[in-house]
Image (cartoon, rainbow, N blue to C red):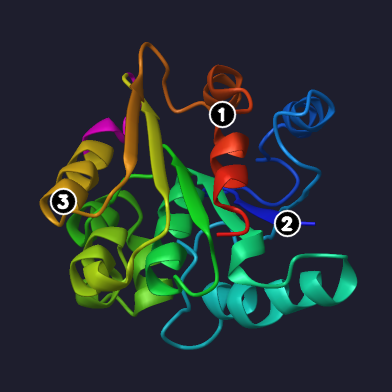
Amino acid sequence: YPVIYWHHGMNCHESNDQFPAAILDRGIRDGKVPPLIMVYPNGGGRTFYCDSVDGSALSETMIVKEFIPHVDATYRTVATREGRALQGMSMGGFGVLKLAFKHPELYSSVVAFAGGDLDADQLETRAPELLQRMFGGDKAKFAAETPMALAKARADTIKLPIRMIVGTKDFLLEHNRRLHAVLEELKIPHEYEEIPDIAHNLPALAKHEGTRTLEFAAKAFGK
């Protein structure tokens, strides 16, 4: 079976910030998406899916080198990039874009729910302890891990389908718009949608999307 890897947001974990399983079940039963597996890794509540400079938190390494191989070894997966998709919300939206841009050989598509692209100055203002703990207080180290920086550095290698969705009342709206503009400037094909009157709210975004993001992933499976 193909696999969608769903990545949770900040201050959350694999059990309290999930794309609704009922929508996936309905999509499969209605024949809109093929039978597939959705898994929810715990990337750490405040990591931005990065490895810390001191090695105490290895979110990216865990997912790429341990979690994916574990899932492939444990379940009947399509154990190639053609059978893997990335999706996530908020910090998870940031994380899936980062992982997709950094490891395009591993994934066939990516969808970011209200992810956007915080810059280092904003991270220092919003979460100075995170900047210190994960990046040793070095804003340049965080900046190098952002989807925007990775898109600029690796534009010629980013070929997978990309979809970004964000509500017009989301506090990350401008961050999404900025990343969308950069992807357009770099001529990296992607879908971008602003959803009216929705704030930073996964249940509301998921209800609006229904099976659309699942169908988006399904179209890329096998390619």
Q: Position of residue 161 (x, y in %)?
A: 42, 51
Residue in view at x 88 percent, y 72 percent = 74
Q: Are marks 2 and 3 in contact (CB under 8 Å)?
A: no
The question of residue 45 being in magenta is answered with no
Q: Residue furthest top?
A: 197
Tell me, for residue 212, which label it has, or none. 1
Magenta part of the chain:
169-174
Q: Is residue 47 left or right of residue 184?
A: right
The residue closer to the viewer here, 104 or 112, is 104
Query: Can you give x and y, in whole percent of width and height, for residue 168 in the image?
Result: 31, 20
- Residue shown at 68%/40% (left/top)? 18
What SS does tag 3 mark?
helix
Residue 136 lies, in percent from the top left, at 34, 80
Residue 173 belongs to the span the image colors magenta: yes
Disc number at residue 2? 2
User: Could you tell me the amino acid type at mark 1?
Assistant: Arg
Q: 205 or 209: which is nearer to us?
A: 209
Left or right of residue 136, residue 44 in this image: right
Q: Which residue is mark 3?
A: 182
Identify the residue at image location x=63%, y=77%. 62
Q: Are marks 2 and 1 in contact (CB under 8 Å)?
A: no
